Amino acid sequence: MTWGTELWDQFENLDKHTQWGIDFLERYSKFVKERLEIEQTYAKQLRNLVKKYCPKRSKDDEPRFSSCVSFYSILNELNDYAGQREVVAEEMGHKVYGELMRYSQDLKSERKQHLQEGRKAQQYLDQCWKQMDNSKKKFERECKEAEKSQISYDRLDNDINATKSEVEKAKSQLYLRTHSADESKNEYAAQLQNFNGEQWKHFNVAIPQIFKNLQDMDERRTVKLGETYRSFADVERRVVPIISKCLEGMVTAAKAVDQRKDSAIVVESFKSGFEPPGDYPFEDYSQNLSRTGSDNTISTPKNEGGVKPDPKHSISKTAKNKLWLFGKKPKSALAPSLEDFSHLPPEQRRKRLQARIDELSKELQKEVDQRDALNKMKDVYEKNPQMGDPQSLQPKISETMCNMEKLRSEIHKNESWLSEVEGKVSTRGDRRPSADVNHHAPHGRESPEGSYTDVPNQEHRSPPHQPDPRQAHQPDEFDDEFDDDDPLPVIGHCKALYSFNGQNEGTLLMKENEVLYIIEEDKGDGWTRARKQSGEEGYVPTSYVEIAMEKNSKDS
């Protein structure tokens, strides 16, 4: 069924239909364009979302918890998913939208050409019809004039009063009119025959061919739409396997979440190395009351040394053993980070020192490799002087050796701190964080902070607090440890080897050769708690005193 035979008289409707077809094609093109814009916007928003929740972070901030690692894996998969949405948008723009727009322009040109041919054929047929109609009208006029001449001639011929000349003139006029009518008839017949022939050609040859071309054009448009519909789906289908892999990656990341591993990381990250505090001692406030001997009376150890302590400066174990979680946190815990990480709990300090040693070892290995490479190059230059001057490498070799020495020194220093941490007793129940102290120590051996002391095998550590010396006795959170009226028993005595200014809060001023009472041993942090004969108590550097413990100190 073709348009040329079935729709021979529907030129205007076919004109409208083909225009509607192109409009529909362009409408679908607009739909594809909006769809790919949605894909582009969606992909951009996904990438921005990933960027927002996966910010740039340093090496130390890398996630270690499995839940965090899985979340960042999901973000990476989502970023890949966004890339596939961009691929969909790009393919739609190139293979669907771009193709439709080019084809739409071709259709418009082709349709215009076919319609122009149809209009020309119609105009030619109209022209033939007008020529035929004009010859027909002329033939009609000539026949009417001939009839009038015939009537005039018959009237004069029958009139006995008409002259012969009048009759001859009428006869001549009739002949002329009749001859003109015959010529008009022949012309009309010829024009009619020509019009009928052109009309047959128009409706049986020209129009069917033009309409067939329009039909082919419209069918090709329909086929093209079907192909682009398929391409529209194929673009989406081609990325489905990759999107499926992205989703599978998200599922795999979800399965990788391990709550036990995360709990272990929490322990590793925050374990302090401290032991839980021991039992609180009994504090007898009836010590100064006069009483008679009684079996039911709880005895209190007497203060050895015969000196009555000053309650204002005494320290109770109850106050000293306060836990940060349940009491006030010392200001020393808020101190800035120190080079030897002595502000950290033992376990965290050990990990930080070990990490630094590993990093320094890697840097040292790089320097060693660079030195070896420079030495090899120098040997090559010495054997082949034309390749280069061996002396030109000496400054770089010297610089590398200098860097190696610096790194070895740093590694040795950090290893000494690490040995200090690992060698300390981990079972003690109380441990004070340290900070720098501003006092002058005799030169001799290196301490973790870079200071020196002459006393061998002793470490120089900082007291918990270092306020202004002029405010050494101002009330502070550290003073809470000295507010108990119950004095600690004397467990030994010591002699000051050096002077110590004791300007930091909680420390005790002492002079060289001064004798002090020991009321608390060094817990491993380099500080010993002592009491003067005046009753004043505080911490002194263990390396600054010579200690003699009482035999029964453990029982006191």
Image (cartoon, rainbow, N blue to C red):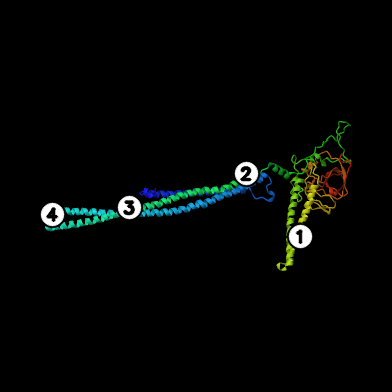
At label 1, the amino acid type is Met
Label 2 and label 4: CA atoms lie apart by 121 Å
Residue 520 point in image, percent of width and height: 84, 43
**For mark 2, does the 10 Å Cα neighbourhood hold few (<14), some (14 to 19), or many (20 or more) residues?**
few
Q: Earlier in the sequence, mark 1 or mark 4?
A: 4
Which-is-in-front pick, marks 4 and 3?
3
Label 3 and label 1: CA atoms lie apart by 107 Å
Q: Nearer the viewer, residue 101 or 285?
A: 101
Is residue 217 left or right of 348 when viewed as pictured?
left
At label 4, the amino acid type is Asp
Which-is-in-front pick, marks 2 and 4?
2
Residue contact at pointers 2 and 4, CB within 8 angstroms: no
Residue 106 visible at all: yes
Q: Earlier in the sequence, mark 1 or mark 2?
A: 2
Identify the residue at horizontal 35%, vertical 52% (top origin): 204
Q: Earlier in the sequence, mark 4 or mark 3?
A: 4
Q: Which residue is mark 2?
A: 251
Q: Which residue is mark 4?
A: 157
Residue 38 point in image, percent of width and height: 53, 48
Name the mark on residue 200: 3
Question: Which SS class for mark 1?
Answer: helix
Question: Which SS class for mark 4?
Answer: helix
